[in-house]
Amino acid sequence: MLRVVAARFVREGRDLLAPFSLELGAGERARLVQPDALGARVAARLAAGIVKPTFGAVTIGDFDSRLQPAQAKRLVGFVPHGGFRGSERAFAREIGFRADVWNVDVGAMTRAAGEILTALRTVPLSATADAYARAMALALAPGVRLAVLELPPEGAIEMVATLRPGVAAVCTSIATDRPVAAPGVLVRRAP
Amino acid sequence: MNGTRATLAIVRREMDARWLVERAAGLVTGLAAGLVFAGANAAGNGAAEYSLLAAAALWFAVSGTLGIDVRDGMYFAAPLYGRQLARAHALAALAGAFALPAGTIIAWAVRGTLGSELAPGGFALPLLYGVALSAIIALSATPRTGAARRFYALGAWLAGAAAMSPYFLGLHDAAYVGLAPALVAGFFGLRAFGETLARYDPIG
């Protein structure tokens, strides 16, 4: 579902992400450990096809994120670090917007988002959980095949496996058990 | 993938309550200007009033376009091409920019001068394509910050003014003289914006 081959991200001559490779099948999970928050953001957005690698390649499903970005991103549910902090009305509008963009039925997407949100609210993720849970519901509702969680609260990636067992999931985190070569990506697969 | 459905969804997303209030204010301003200002005739009478109207309409087009949040992370996470995003943002920008000229055109219709304003020597066409060009070029300012943003915004205003200049210079068939350059500049402006979006890496 996700194949990253020697991907690097360079901006203004600075390596924000050291080369890393990863192959993830349906239902598998991995954690990309980064030395800092910027690296974690870049790693997550690279895995989601939102930013393109300066060197190397990212393939989502059968689609190269650089050559077929729209097809690749159609398979991805990206959950940003800040979650979704809008009102209930804004949340409903966002569901409608995503249904239009992913070209899925609004009613089905509303039901899916509601079910995911209900399930997520039964488990205490963290203090910031509600905004993150709503972002997860929005990301997973269109029926994606890869979930990318940017700096999620504890337990969030496990919830993806519970809610959508066939969906591959990647999350990023900041290293607390130093030393981690900086910049670098440490890939940890879920057992 | 249904491109039209996605495009309209993006346009609707930009048209929130604040957008509607600002466009309504523009419409009323344009209406008042059209009712108060007399048309510029061959002797140049009223040209200053129309210059003021043009300046206000261009400012309204540029400032309204700068309010479009093209850096919204959702747009880049969604299954959309850069050119799709560019077209949708351009539609939103144009819809916003036309509010003030629409008010003026309504006022001209009320005054019974719309026919002469739509004629080759009239101001209706230059006003419309001038603000459209400004809005399109101002889109390239939206992903940028700081001095680059201000530079593009100023460039957008000046491009719109340049497109209207044949009218103020009193050229024969002025409305048509500025049209072709405005269309060409608008096409390349939109293309440049699409390429900017395609290259944009939202890591902030």
Image (tube, coloured by chain):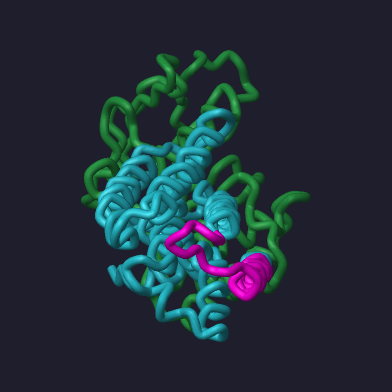
Chain colours: A green, B cyan
Q: Position of residue B21 (x, y in %)?
A: 68, 70
Q: Measuring 56% from the left and 28% from the top, which residue is drawn there? A: B147
Asked if B69 appears above or below B45 in the picture, the reply is above
The span picked out in magenta is B21-46
Q: Measuring 27% from the left and 41% from the top, which residue is drawn there? A: A66
| Residue closest to the far front | B43
Asked if B79 appears above or below A174 in the picture, the reply is below
Say if residue A163 shows up in the picture.
Answer: no
Residue B45 highlighted magenta (yes or no): yes
Q: Measuring 41% from the left and 81% from the top, which residue is drawn there? A: B115
> So how many labels did they put on this image?
0
Q: Measuring 40% from the left and 56% from the top, which residue is drawn there? A: B167
**Dominant secondary structure (helix, strand or loop) of the stretch shown in magenta:** helix
Left or right side of A41 for B5 = left
- Closest to the observer: A25 or B87? B87
Asked if B61 appears above or below A17 in the picture, the reply is below
Left or right side of A189 for B38 = right
Q: Position of residue B126 (x, y in %)?
A: 40, 61
Q: Where is residue B88 in the image (x, y as percent from the top left)?
A: 40, 62
Q: Where is residue B176 in the image (x, y as percent from the top left)?
A: 28, 61
Say if residue A66 shows up in the picture.
Answer: yes
- Closest to the observer: A172 or B136? B136
Give the image quarter of residue B36: bottom right
Residue A60 highlighted magenta (yes or no): no
Left or right side of A70 for B128 = right
